[in-house]
Amino acid sequence: MPQFANIAVSILFDGLAYAMFLFITSVGLSVTMGLMGFVNLAHGAFAMAGGYIVVTLTRSYGVGFVPSLVIAAVVVGAVSVVFERFLYRRLYKSTDLEQVLLTIGLAFMAIATATYLYGPIPKSVPLPDWLQGDVNLGFRYFPSYRAFLIVLGTVLISVLWYAFERTNIGAKIRAAVDNRRMAESVGINVDRLFTLTFAVGSGLAALGGGLAIQLLGLSPSFAVLYLVLFLIVVAVGGLGSLKGTLLAALVLGIFDTGGKYLFADAGGFFVYAVTVVVLLIKPAGFYGRE
Amino acid sequence: MAASETPGATARERAADYLAKRHRFRLAEALPWLIAIAVFFIFPTRMTFGSQVLVMVMFALSLDLILGYAGIVTLGHAAFFGVGAYTVGLAAARLEWTEPISGLFAAAIAAGLVGFVTGWFLLRYRGLTLLMLTLATAILLQETGNLRSDISGGYDGLPGLTFKPLLGIFDYDLYGHTYYLYVLAVLAVVFYLVRRIVYSPFGQALTGIRENVRRMHAIGSPVHRRLVTVYTIAAAIAGVAGALFTQTNAYVTLTVFDFDNSAKVMVMLILGGTGRLYGAFVGAAVYMVLEDYFSKLSPTFWQFGIGLMLVLAVLFAPRGILGVFERFGNYLSERKRS
């Protein structure tokens, strides 16, 4: 295979895997922000919590990697309901600023707790054999872990798409994102709907956090470091839009990977440049409402 | 009210009267300045730290102008602090321009220019979009600096800068006495300007924009132009704070552009209280002293502490420390009356 085609395929493959991680982690944030307009800067902390649960389960209790991911998602999803009920709920009608401050406060506390419990050094996780090494796709070898990410991401996207577009609850969520008051007046319990989506979104974030350990490394600063990226995905995609989040994750994931492959010095330049250009042209993101 | 005192006055005179009355200096306002001078005599060995507190006060004050008065929520205010810091740093390291006071003006102009250009584009947006765009601005500046690390020194920064004596007379001394008084003097000048702006009709228009943008549009106020103006001024002040930061520390690194720096100044301001000028003083001083004390004990514990403080502040004291005092004062005066 010619050199440039080889690089292009690598960028597409790695970019796709990275985009799946971004999508899984950010989609919950997008839907909850679209529903309640709540700026949740603690979303990265939920992802980080998921990552550390996976580390603990696999390292100290010998649970397999995939079961740990599921457990982490369920546990964080359940715990997030407590936060939603007792803290977030009080600030739905407050200004952006107060929501930003409360949730960044929670994120700081989460980082400190993680540093206290696990130390500042990045953690790794033992992977099962079938996720290590490379997989042959006929014309080339690819890293198995990234292939796994792409398959998992595709499955999750299909499930979410079906739940969003074809089920009763999905229809209710779409109605509430579109016009909250109208949805409430036709008898949809938006509060309960929100608790549900918040739990699912946080659970997915925890899953993303678990998946990120191998991809990006997991240290306490994860909660804030990657939060910016999740927020960018949400802002570029448009609040509350599944389609938008996916498109934004793909564009940003592939641009970031490509930028790092081709111009190592420029680092994170590309993600931010793309963000600025998109938001200047479409302030509400790809599929957001103006 | 002024209206009942002068019934025959026109609306314009009454409004002017009201503004002039608010603008008058009150006795209590001398307190922070007296404390700052007292600190100079009581803690002569901690003057470097004292200068840093004063620099952060100025930085928080510039944020108060846009966040507290104009209601612009930004996560990238460190961009202007950084531009100011690097203007002075690069001038000293690369151009041998080490005269401190002209450096401040250069920093103000450079940061103001960046504020004007970015503000012109960004202030059309609100909410999450604005948050992300301001954040991206600061990070893009940081990445640009990193890209040209041959000029900026990258993350290693520009260490060991030296500056000419102040006004050609007062040299830098070991404990930083000169610089403390220098920063205090600059802060006093800046504060006077900010106070003038806040109590002017222009400042009233900003408060109007914060409270109700639609109504300001409806009465024909040039909202975008006002916002860009105040954003530029705040950027210039943040630039001066950054320049003073470089001059007092004698080094600067790219971490001045960090998200942490933007978040920190916001926390200080919120802690003290927004939209009340002296909130910046209280917030920055309390935060810096607590940080100095607790982060020596345990940085982890300190980080948990800031988080907890923020959560508690939002839930129980949304108007900051000064807001709590104000409420307490109101409570006392009501009890006295009854």
Image: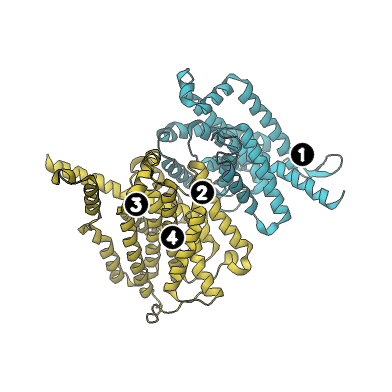
Chain colours: A cyan, B yellow
Q: Which residue is mark 2?
A: B122
Judge left or right: residue B170 versus residue A40: left
The residue type indicated by label 4 comes to Ala
Dots 2 and 1: beta carbons under 8 Å? no
Query: Looking at the picture, which amino acid does disc 3 mark?
Result: Phe
- Mark 2 vs mark 1, foreground winner is 2
Mark 1 Cα within 10 Å, few/some/many (few <14, many 20+)?
few
* Label located before the other in sequence (2 or 4): 2
Say if residue A64 shows up in the picture: no
- Label 4 near label 1: C-beta < 8 Å? no
Q: Is residue A61 left or right of residue A14?
A: left
Depth check, mark 1 against mark 4: the one in front is 4
Q: Position of residue B79 (x, y in %)?
A: 50, 57
Q: Secondary structure at mark 3?
A: helix
Query: Decide: marks 1, 3 in contact (CB < 8 A)?
Result: no
Return the residue at label 4: B238
Query: What residue is drawn where x is 79% and y is 44%?
Result: A142
Nearest to the eye among marks 3 and 2: give it. Answer: 3
Q: Residues within 10 Å of mark 4 (few under 14, many from 20)?
A: many
Q: Nearer the viewer, mark 1 or mark 3?
A: 3
